[in-house]
Amino acid sequence: MGILTQPSTTATSNNHCSFCHKKDDYRHQHQCIDIGDLVNDEETRSIQVTNANTTSWTSKQWLILITSMLSKFGCALCLSLQGPFFPAEAARKGVTATTYGFVFSSFSLTVFLLAPVFGKYVAKIGPRFLMNSGIFVTSFCCILFGLLDKMTHSYFVTFAFLVRIVEATGDAAYNAANFATMAATFPEDIGKIFVNNVLLTQSELSILQALRIPSVSLSMTAVCFGTVSISFLSATLEAHLRQFNLNAIQVGSVFIISGGVFAVTAILWGWLFDGKVPPKILIAIGACFMCCTYILIGPAPFLPFDSSLALCIIALTFHGFGTGTQMLTSHIDAVKHSM
């Protein structure tokens, strides 16, 4: 299994590697690079050759998948802990909703800016080092975020931004390394494994060139709307739930609903994407779910009923379906159209 590393006019392949032929005025050259050069890990090299007809995964593939799932779950837990508590703490210190909304948004913006950088240099830095350092930075910043209540108002906002931005840097590094490793381990199962930015290191297209492809730009627009939706709920849901007089555990349980539905249905959307349902149809279905979320969670003024906890739970369930469909399908569709 190999990867193209230079712009080429012709390319040939066999069961072991892909050859890139580049022709200029003086010479004709070809180059074969094993996928192990990307992963930079002896243990991963032993499982890199996966036949297209293989229907079962090896024990090492399962181990890598489970490890990736657990680490991703741990990072998500660290980030999710902040939603139920931070808005209330910020309000007690006199911080406006707009300001702590920007604190939440700074995380996504930082990841958006740094993900292409880490994706481009993941092969040079090494996925193992990048993944371990990313997890360490993210977890350390999560601990620091829990100590912000000891600060006064003037320092509270400043350090909230700093910690959140550094935390996002670690998360971007971890995700870039994780996706590259998963792509090398499961080259034939991209739809099931959810690899979204592996082409940052392998594609001959630049980011701007990729965005000029209509399917890619549409998919990335859907991802942006999904991310904005998640960030909006992270900053405002806790304040909306105060009217129901819930304790911290109950508020946290409500926050879990959307992400839990996302996690449970992600495999379903990946399975439907792999030749079952056209991706654009799935993206449209996800958009409908997202619309239903914001119509119900308010609820909208034209609805003949008032806000209730049950209605919020139903709306967040729709949100989990919507984000799972939109973001998962959009990422994979963008990858396939960029190849």
Image (spheres, rainbow, N blue to C red):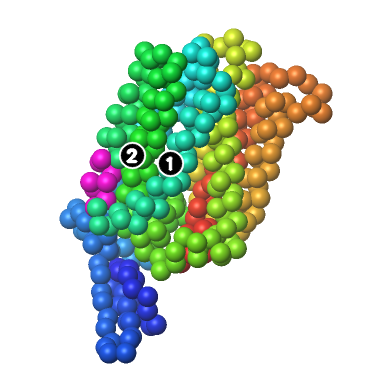
Among all residues in the image, which is located at the extreme front?
154
Please tell me whether mark 2 sits on a helix, a strand or a loop: helix
User: Is 90 drawn above or below residue 275 in the view shown?
Assistant: above
- Crowding around mark 1 (Cα neighbors within 10 Å: few <14, some 14 to 19, many 20+) is some
Say which amino acid is labelled 1: Thr
**Residue at the image position 43 percent from the left and 47 percent from the top:** 113
Return the x and y of residue 19 as percentages of the image width and height: 30, 77
Return the x and y of residue 285 as percentages of the image width and height: 65, 47
> In terms of secondary structure, what is the magenta stretch mainly?
helix
Q: Is residue 216 left or right of residue 301?
A: left
Among all residues in the image, which is located at the extreme left?
42
Return the x and y of residue 249 as percentages of the image width and height: 48, 15
To which residue does mark 1 refer? 110
**Residue at the image position 27 percent from the left and 35 percent from the top:** 136
The residues colored magenta run 126-133
Say which amino acid is labelled 2: Gly
| Foreground disc of the pair 1, 2 | 1
Q: How far is disc 1 from disc 2 in space, using C-alphas?
A: 10 Å
Q: Is residue 93 left or right of residue 180?
A: right
